[in-house]
Amino acid sequence: MTHKKKVVIIGGGTAGLVIANNLQNYFDVIIVEKSQYKKYPKRYSPPLLIGLFFRSKKLKYISKRYFVLKYGRHIPFFESNVFGGASIINGCVHMLGDKTRWSYILKKFDSNYDELIDSYQKIYSLNLKNKNIINLSLSCQNIIDKAFIKTLNFFGIPKGDTNYSNVESCGPIYNTVGNFFRTSVVSLISKKNFKYHIGECVENLLFTGSVVTGVKTNLREIKSDYVVLSGGVIGTCDLLLRERSRLEREKGHSVLKDLAIGEDIQDHTNLRINILTNKGIDSLNEISNSFFKKISLFVKHFTGQSTLMKGTGATSAVHLDLDNDGEIDTRIQIVQFSETGRHGSDGKFFSSSQPGFSLSITAIHPKSKGKIVLDGSDSIVDPMFLSLKKDIELLKLALNFCMKLLRSRPINKHIFKIENYIDIKSNPEKYIINNIFSGHHLIGGAHNIIDSNFGLRGIKKLYICDASIFDRYAASNIHSSVVLIADIFSNKFIKSESDKCQDLS
C-alpha cells in the first residue's frame, strides 16, 4: 500500500489501542478518545493499588454509573477515564477461556482457533524479559490457597491451568503484571506512529449516502477513508443509537433504522461469600490496619518477592460444571480479603479488620440478556441481571458447592466463621439477589448488526470491533477476549486492504 489511507478509530481503549498499534505501519491512524486523562499517577501501577481508584471519594480517573436491578437495588458500574480504557483500570485477572466457545465465535469472522493462538503467543508472555507484550505472572499462594486446592483435589477436581476453562480444574490465577507494575494494551506499543485526541467526543458520523466518510467531534470534523468503532459496549451502542435518532430527525429516514442496536447485551454477575479465619493469613483486611504490614508488603514486592501486590487480591480459581451438562459453567476464586460491597461501593474498604478471605463466584455463561436504550440526553444500560431463573439456579448450585467445600478438610481447619451463613442456607435466592454486583464484563449490542468482516451491515467504510461484537462469553474475564478479537480484526483488515491494492495493480 504505497498511499496510506486514513483510518479514524473511535475509542482509545482495550480494542482501539490494539487496532491502532497494528494498523499504524499501513495506514494514517487517528484515535478519538473521550477520556480526560492520558495516564494515571505511577503510584497506582502496582496491581493491588488499582483498587484505590474505586474506593476514592473523588473519582478522577474513572466514572461511575449505576445499574438498577429489577428488585430495586442500585449497583455501581465503573468506566475508565484514562487513555487505554478498561485494560488500564480492570485488566489484572487473566484467562483465555474455552476452546469450543472461541471456535464458535471465530467462525462468524472466517477465522479459527489456530489464528487465535497465533495472536495470543504474539501478545502475551510469561517471560518478563520480553518487550512490547502483555506480561503474565502467576499469583502468590498462601495457606488458604493451598488448602483450597487440596480440598478440591479431594473432591476429584485436579490441578490444572486456570488460563483455560475447557475442563474442571483448579490452580493459581494469572495476572497481567511484569516484575513490579501492571501491564496492559499500552505495553504493546513500542512507537506511536498514530495520532490521538484525548478528551474529545465523537458527536456523529459523517455520511455520503450509506458510506461513512469521517466523524464530527465536539471540536472538529475529521475526514477519513475508514472509521472503526471501538467505544466498548456502552460507547458503541450509545453512538449508533444517537446517530440513528439524528438521521431520522434531520433527514426523515435513517440507514441504521432496521439494525438491532443495543439488543441482547450481557454482563457477568459477581457474588461473594465472606469468611473469617481463626488465625492470621496476611489478608488485606489485616494489612490495611497495620502500618508495619503495609511497609513489609511494599518492601517484599519491590525486592522481587511474590506477594499480593502482584494482583488485585484474587489468587486461586476453580472451573466447574455444576449442572453436569458437559460444559464448564462456573468459576470460583479465592480473594484475599472480605468486603461488604464490591469495590467498597458501600463506603467501606473491608467488612472486618479480622483476618479473612472471600469466595468470588462467577457464572461464566449467563442466560439473561438486556439492552441499551436512549432516554433523552442519557443512555440507559440494563443487562437484566438474573432475569432468567436458570441464572439464579446456577448460583444456588454454586453457593451449595461453596458451603460443602468450606465444611471439608483441610480448608475447614482455617475457618472461624462464614458470614451470613444462616441467610445463605435458609434463603439462598434472597442472598443472591441482595448481594450480587456487576462483573464489569459487558458484551453484546452490536453482534447482530455486523458481517464477517466486522463491517456494519448496509453501511460502507464503517467497522465495529470491541466487546459489543461478542454474542457469548469465551471466558469469565473479557480482557484477553477483547484484545485478541482486536488483533484478529486488525490482521483481517490489513490483509483485505493489501489484497485490494494487489488487485488494482
Image (tube, rainbow, N blue to C red):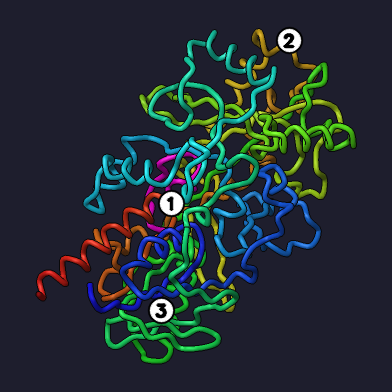
Judged from the image, the secondary structure of the residue bearing numbered disc 3 is helix
Q: Nearer the viewer, residue 295 or 156?
A: 295
Given contact means CB atoms under 8 Å apart, are the residues at marks 1 and 3 in contact? no
Relative to 224, does residue 315 appear above or below in the rendering? above
Give the labeled residue for mark 3.
244
> In the image, is 353 to the left or to the right of 215?
right
**Quadrant in which the C terminus is drawn:** bottom left
Which numbered disc covers residue 483? 1
Count of numbered tags? 3
Q: Nearer the viewer, mark 1 or mark 2?
A: 1
**Residue occupying image coordinates x 72% and y 34%:** 303
Question: What residue type is disc 3 on?
Answer: Arg
Q: In the figure, residue 58 lies in which quadrant?
A: bottom right
> In the image, is 377 to the left or to the right of 288?
left
Give the labeled residue for mark 2.
413
Residue 9 picture location, percent across and down: 42, 71
Residue 491 picture location, percent across and down: 29, 57
Residue 110 picture location, percent across and down: 21, 51
Q: Residues within 10 Å of mark 2 (few under 14, many from 20)?
A: some
Q: Nearer the viewer, residue 253 or 352?
A: 352
**Quadrant in which the N terminus is drawn:** bottom left
What range of the chain is rendered magenta? 468-482
Cα gap from disc 1 to disc 3, whole angstroms: 28 Å
Q: In the figure, residue 307 lies in which quadrant?
A: top right
Which numbered disc covers residue 234? none
Precedes in sequence: disc 1 or disc 3: 3
Relative to 178, does residue 187 appear above or below in the rendering? below
**Residue occupying image coordinates x 47% and y 67%:** 192
Question: What residue type is disc 2 on?
Answer: Lys
Judged from the image, the secondary structure of the residue bearing numbered disc 1 is helix
